[in-house]
Amino acid sequence: MTYLNNIGLYFLMIKEMFRKPTKWSVMKGLILKDIDDLVIGSLGIVAFISFFVGGVITIQTALNITNPLIPKYLVGFATRQSVILEFAPTFTSIIMAGKVGSFITSSIGTMRVTEQIDALEVMGINSLNYLVFPKAVAMMLYPFAIAIGMFLGILGGMAACVYGGYTTLEDYITGIQMDFDGFHMTYSFLKTFVFAFILATIPSFHGYYMKGGALEVGKASTTSFVWTSVVIILINYILTDMLLG
Amino acid sequence: MIEVKGLHKSFGDAHILKGIDAYFEKGETSLVIGQSGSGKTVFIKCLLGLFPYDKGTISYDGKIYSELSEDQKRNLRAEIGMVFQGSALFDSMTIQENVMFPLRMFTKMSKSEMEDRADVVLKRVNLDDAHNKMPSEASGGMQKRVAIARAIVNNPKYLFCDEPNSGLDPKTAIVIDNLIQEITDEYQIVTVINSHDMNSVMEIGEKIVFLQHGYKEWEGSKDTIFKTDNKAVTDFVYSSELFKKVRQMYIEEKQ
């Protein structure tokens, strides 16, 4: 029953988020700040993880191709497909649920605990529009971070492949160019946009509606990470089945 | 004037407010007092519209709150200033930005006009050299004064303060009390303070509403509270030996 109640409350929050918009001159500043905090501030970790996980995917694929009849360029092909279809949009989003999600939950939760949200409401400001809407808008730039992640994942795979001596550079490049389907990019970015909205709103929900003190802020951050990850994985399954199935 | 009639509020089975009647006048510092759990915070939050109430009416200068549209409620709230117990300053903004915040949200003032207005109110609360400090760098007393400055910067018609003295030393608490009273008088606003600090009662209680177990048990002023025979009030007010002595001296002096 609590779960159903929370799901209903989440959708009411989304509806309320679009009502009584904050002055554009103020909102513009909030959006830019959130782009800096949530997207630009995440580029470093996205780049680092993408590069090395791309390398690991390549090494694992190369080591598991033991049949001499399978061409070596398939290592590049498998890396590209893994990175573009799943690793960059989904795996990175789950990591972002920890980084961006816990930041959002703890910052909004602290505002709740210290009555800053009440202060906004008393002033006649729609606190959901003021706090959550700019985060949702800022996260619409998240696919750019994922695009960088895709590029660096494939680059990391190439570095691992060539410097590890698993295949030649030519084979790897042949592999990453082979049978390229543009719709895979559409699918990947479409789900990234959905994940971006989830990454902005579910942690905001957990922060906004939390009750208690500092300890509960920590608990809310953990719960927010778990639920954001669960929803991302479920939505990933549904979208994959709908778009590629 | 704020007029409250038959206000009821429950949370599940817990009936917190059981038919409160009260009115608060312009230019008068009113205190809502009572023990912890008596319903004062719920009462104030109902007045502010943060909690929807179950029964009764709250009217602001004749406008009944529950009958207002969402837009009218928003406009009304823009006329309310609030000083929270923990100050509730926005910790990502400087003190000056905190004070300018209501102006940024509700006026079309230019940046320099907002800065001038912030200077005036910060000076009014005796904080003329703290503009660029962050709230975390300010003492408890300074934070309270910034909260008062933010509450009055937009010339509110109504000022609410939730335990403005909590966590302050007695000397700073008196400074804050006097500041609130002076501002109330100077700007002719309706001020309602939620408190259980007896020093505040003695210092600025032009009107006192005593709540107990969700009922309005007693109403009076800082002068009449000395003379009342209401047992609930005397038990609350004179719970310490010091106040018992003060009351005795006051009565003797009056006689």
Image (cartoon, rainbow, N blue to C red):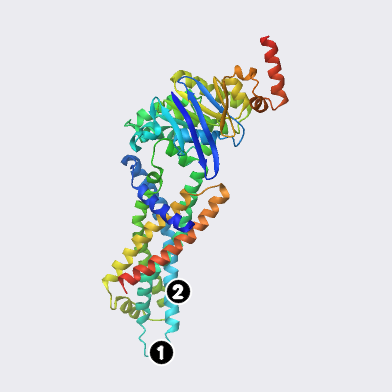
Quarter in which the C terminus of chain A is drawn: bottom left
CB under 8 Å between discs 1 and 2: no
Q: Name the element at disc 2.
A: helix
Horizontal relation, residue A37 to residue B33: left or right:
left
Q: Chain of mark 2?
A: A
Task: Name the kind of residue labelled 1 in the image.
Answer: Asn
Residue A170 visible to an observer of this rendering: yes
Q: Relative to the observer, which residue lies in front, A167 or B225?
A: B225
Determine the residue positioned at 45% across, 20% down: B26
Q: Which mark is residue A67?
A: 1
Q: Relative to the observer, which residue lies in front, A194 or B142?
A: A194
Position of residue A68 measured from the top left corner of the image (x, y, whole percent):
39, 90
Position of residue B206 measured from the top left corner of the image (x, y, whole percent):
54, 19
Position of residue A162 relative to residue A96, above or below, is below
Position of residue A88 measured from the top left corner of the image (x, y, whole percent):
39, 67
Position of residue B94 measured from the top left corner of the image (x, y, whole percent):
46, 37
Task: Name the kind of residue labelled 2 in the image.
Answer: Val
Q: Which mark is residue B27?
A: none
Q: Which residue is mark 2?
A: A56
Q: Name the element at disc 1.
A: loop
Horizontal relation, residue A25 to residue A216: left or right:
left
Q: Chain of mark 1?
A: A
Dot 1 or dot 2: first in sequence order is 2
Residue B84 visible to an observer of this rendering: no
Q: Which residue is situated farthest in the top direction here?
A: B255
Total marks placed: 2
Determine the residue positioned at 56% across, 46% down: A213
Position of residue A79 relative to residue B250, above or below, is below
Please tell me how crowded label 1 is: few (under 14), some (14-19), or many (20+) other residues with Cα within 10 Å: few
